[in-house]
Image: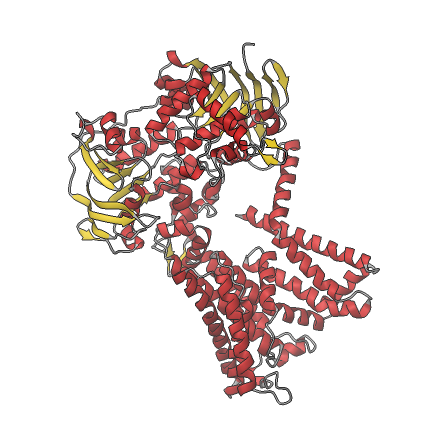
Amino acid sequence: MKKEMRKEYTIALVAVGLGLLAGALLMLVTGNNPILGFIYLISGGLMNIERIGNTLATATPLIFTGLSVAFAFKTGLFNIGGAGQMLIGGLCATVIGLTLNWPKPLLLTVIIIASALGGALWGLVPGWLKAKFNVHEVVCTIMMNWIAYWSVYYIIPAYFKGAYLETESRRIPEAASLKVGWLTDLFRGSYINLGFFLAIIAVVVIAYILERTTLGYELKAVGLNRYAAEYAGIQSNRNIILSMMIAGACAGLGGAAFYVGYASNMQIGVLPSQGFDGVAVSLLGANSPWGVFMAAIFFGVLHSGKGFMNAMTQVPPEIADSIIATIIYFSATSVLIEKYWGRLQKRLAEKEKTGPPLVAEEEIKEKVGGAS
Amino acid sequence: MEYVVEMLKIRKEFPGVVANDDITLQLKPGEIHALLGENGAGKSTLMSILFGLYQPDAGMIKVRGQEVKINDPNVANELGIGMVHQHFKLVHNFTVTENIMLGMEMTKGLVINHTAAAEKIRELSKRYGLNVDPDAKIEDISVGMQQRVEIMKMLYRDAEVLIFDEPTSVLTPQEINDLIGIMRNLAKEGKSIILITHKLKEIKAIADRCTVIRRGRVVGTVEVASTSEEEMARMMVGREIRFAVEKTQREAGAVVLQVENLSALNNRKVMGLKNFSLQVRAGEILGLAGVEGNGQAELVEVITGLRKAEDGRVMLKGTDITNLSVRERIRMGMSHIPSDRHKHGLILDYTLEENMILKIYDEPPYAEKGLLNRETIRKHTERVMQEFDVRSGQGSLALARSLSGGNQQKAIVGREIDIDPDLLIAVQPTRGLDVGAIEYIHKRIVEQRDKGKAVLLVSLELDEILTLSDRIAVIYNGELIGIVEAQATNEQEIGLMMAGVQRGETA
């Protein structure tokens, strides 16, 4: 178990390293100094307390959507509907924030619950269709993204039109915002908000569910081997629905953290890119809750540092995006890294005879088979 | 030239394990040489070295008297060494000819010359008595025939040395006889054969000599004709093996499982089980014999709740359970050793601990208020592992995947018996296991019967059915052909019934 984890962290680090290397090459090709570029990229994200706050605020929705993807993946489901679930979560939060006039603690509690429920509903539909009719969840969640997109497109201008622009909602009142004065002051006026702490809580809760509860045991069993789960009397359909609902709830919370935390109003006509970036975060984080947390923070640094890098050097901000894309690419092809890693270890072992344990007999048979 | 292949003093080490230690194997031309050993004894490593997948740390290989270095399988092929795999490697919607010439197509200009290839195949087929139709599609021919196509592939490539890896594990008794005939023909025509197996009966039937290896070392090479099965078994395992399971006479008790007029659809949505009735009593082992695919799987799945019954009912201890869930049936005292340990029996990427609680994970003391109790689970696992002799390198935290087949199966048997069921359904409980593990699992199954539990044993191995069962039911084409007392029958009678002949029809 421990060894597995270590392997996955190694792969993630190799992916990051290769991504940065590709970025460095790009900077060289475009005639820039990569060392300088990276210094500004990193310091842009971590230079002072305000920037650190902004980095964490940028990472917050990514933690939620990353968790969402990772959680569904544990049950063998690919939730690509993070964007729609985020939108619905954000919509619930915004609608409540603009409608109810309650004291801040109470209002925030309701907002958080509502956004989680909204996201869960957006996960429930694909989960139910998958369980009942075996409709593929990828197709279904993508469709749900567009339903969310057009729902926001209609509801915001129709009922919550902004003061100046048709394309955005009114600003939410201070009482409905996850931003709080002391935190903003602590981080010298940064965007950081309570959503970050909510994200940490979510990471802890999800890790706890997966590792310690019978629910987590069931969900993972269904994901790893549906036949064996059913043989043992685990109802895989129930677990598929539940898994999608919890995944949806995570992304829904991400919506609240983004629309009433990081931002203070809702724009129409935008599918939040964090929904899709969640897939990358989950991949890089090896689908483990704390892995997701670290991956999201890392992407947060790159996202919030790229502007500074652009301001201080001739390196275009697109380089940072390319680095992110390359890292995603390498973590998506982690199988290759793993394979190469295994071969490297084996070769070392052949030399020193202290490498990996004896390959199981059946595996050898497989190989004998594959070679003819 | 006395030997066609010589592997001399081969040594192969893996970290922490010596897989092959000073192994010498000499193959005479035209001989059938059996390689006998338990799972993990080093047979596969040795053959992988001969096939060029591993390089030996010490020792040398000679082919036709010449020392050779086999760096990869292509070299092995060029030297005329071919392998018939346990799992066939055929393209299902290709014809026999297309499959055989795949990778070395005869061409006429840019066009593949099918006729010439088919002609060569026909010729080879006749010469070795393979009886293969070059134009048939793989998906239309039987498993036994597919195996012949694999053999033909080797002959087509002019292989002189054929390695058969557990060739009979997928065949029916009749097909096994045919295969034995074919192997004799091959040997008669001058081919040399290495037969990897742990079935002593087959060795006795066809092999000339047998090399036994145990824990990476050669125990000895013997002339098969002058060595008894018991002696070979002792060489392989290193201790006495009792073939006859000790079983005392016992009166069967009350009916535990009653199946009444059960019908069910199979995966192709046609009736795979037709009007099937059966009773299993406390304190008896009822063996269900039949050739694979005759409705056994459907019957077991309906009884365990994995498949819906179209008609009829299933009663457990007098209660109608036809519409109960899998979980409810388990709670009522039904346990099930599934036929496919990788598909149903285990979650391979779960640890042994997690697999041990597969059916009880939500019951106290293993879980309370929805939280797993890791401490209790570990103790439980360690106890079952000890009791059922499950060995793993990393103890209870090892991934199920990392265990050998025998240990995986023992873990499943342990889990299922430890629930203390009233009804134990054991499907192919010893598939692919070596003699030592088989003996052990058989003992535990008989133990259940002696404790007054009902046991339904489903197996494709006639020997297993005959040694363990008190009564034997035979299924053919989804129907019950008959039930006989195990003591009042023999292999011939059951064999006929397995082919669909009703008892008393022949005289």
Front-lying residue, B179 or B427: B179
Q: Residue at x 24, y 48 (%)?
A: B263
User: Which quadrant holds the C terminus of chain B?
Assistant: top left
Residue A241: image x %, image y %? Answer: 42, 63
Q: Residue at x 78, y 55 (%)?
A: A25
Left or right, residue B375 beside residue A254 = left
Q: Residue furthest toward the top?
A: B1
Q: Residue at x 53, y 29 (%)?
A: B117
Left or right, residue A243 beside residue A172 = left
Residue A94: image x %, image y %? Answer: 54, 81
Placement of A86 over or under A351, stated as above or below: below
Residue A172 sits in quarter: bottom right
Q: Residue at x 40, y 61 (%)?
A: A133
> Would residue A52 be visible to someone looking at this image?
yes
Residue A3: image x %, image y %? Answer: 56, 46
Front-lying residue, B497 or A89: B497
User: Which quadrant holds the N terminus of chain B?
Assistant: top right
Q: How many discs appear?
A: 0
Residue A59: image x %, image y %? Answer: 63, 67
Left or right, residue B496 beside residue B402 = left
> Would residue B454 be visible to someone looking at this image?
no
Front-lying residue, B149 or A360: B149
